[in-house]
Amino acid sequence: MTDAIAYLRTSSAANVDGDSSERQRLAIQQYADTHHYIVVDEFYDAAVSGADPVETRKGFAAMLDRIDGNGVRVVLVEDVSRFARSLMAQELGVLLMQQRKVRVLTSNGDDLTETDDPSRIMMRQIAGAFAQYEKARTVAKLKAARDRKSQAAGHRIEGAKGHRADVPSMVFGAVKEIVTRFPSVTLAGIVNELTDGGLRTTGRLPYSQTQVARVIKAMGLTKEDGRK
């Protein structure tokens, strides 16, 4: 028998009072009984959208604390939509689990952390492409806003240089998670965590400490957070 953690999520307040959580719990328990898992703990994000980033969910964060503290390396969910509904949230969540060598299994036997599955690899590539697209849209919108302000002011107004220009949003989420989990981590340590988690530049090179420092600065963190 192998220890496992159950993760449940409902997307609206109305579902919290319904049978959604019980349905999820039953499906997870049936899978656990059939495949020799013991559910030793349960974490539940109530009224949380499946599109919400995993790092903002209290239940998900508490689950990571439990995983880091006791060595459980299997998470059971009813289906992939309970883990996360949006592709970006799914893939960031998968990366966080892979970094901890945790498997995420659905009640129908799908392994969401299986890196050899061509369809999962394809989805991860799509997620990266989408992140790049969103980054380009954001940069274009910010430039257009600066152009309008510059024209009104009669001189050129520039924004902060480059802290998002070379880093997709998925990396911001991963860096935030690493810094939150390990407050004394160094820049080199963050680079290693990103690389081990498969997050690299578009040229497939590891992110530099300079790029990581820009991300940390952009998130409002300071040297007092323990990085050097």
Image (spheres, grey):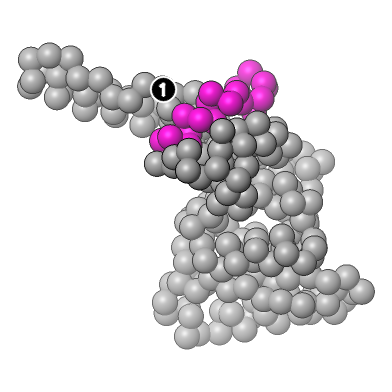
- From the viewer's perspective, is residue 151 above or below residue 109? above
Question: Observer-nearest residue: 142 or 129?
Answer: 142
User: Residue 110 lies in what quarter of the image?
Assistant: bottom right
* Magenta stretch contains residue 92: no
Question: Observer-nearest residue: 225 or 130?
Answer: 225
Taking the image as shown, residue 183 lies to the left or right of residue 157, namely right
If the image is split into quadrants, where does the C terminus sit? top right
Residue 19 at x, y percent in the picture: 56, 84
| Residue interval drawn in magenta | 198-218
Rate crowding at label 1 as few (under 14), some (14 to 19) or many (20 or more) other CA atoms within 10 Å: few
Residue 116 at x, y percent in the picture: 82, 41
* Magenta stretch contains residue 213: yes
User: Residue 184 lies in what quarter of the image?
Assistant: top right
Residue 62 at x, y percent in the picture: 60, 67
Taking the image as shown, residue 70 lies to the left or right of residue 44, namely right
Residue type marked 1 = Gly
If the image is split into quadrants, where does the N terminus sit? bottom right
Which residue in the rendered view is the most extreme toward the right? 1
**Residue at position x 33%, y 25% from top?**
160
**Residue at position x 67%, y 79% from top?**
25
- From the viewer's perspective, is residue 100 above or below residue 115? below
**Residue at position x 83%, y 71% from top?**
3
Identify the residue under disc 1: 162
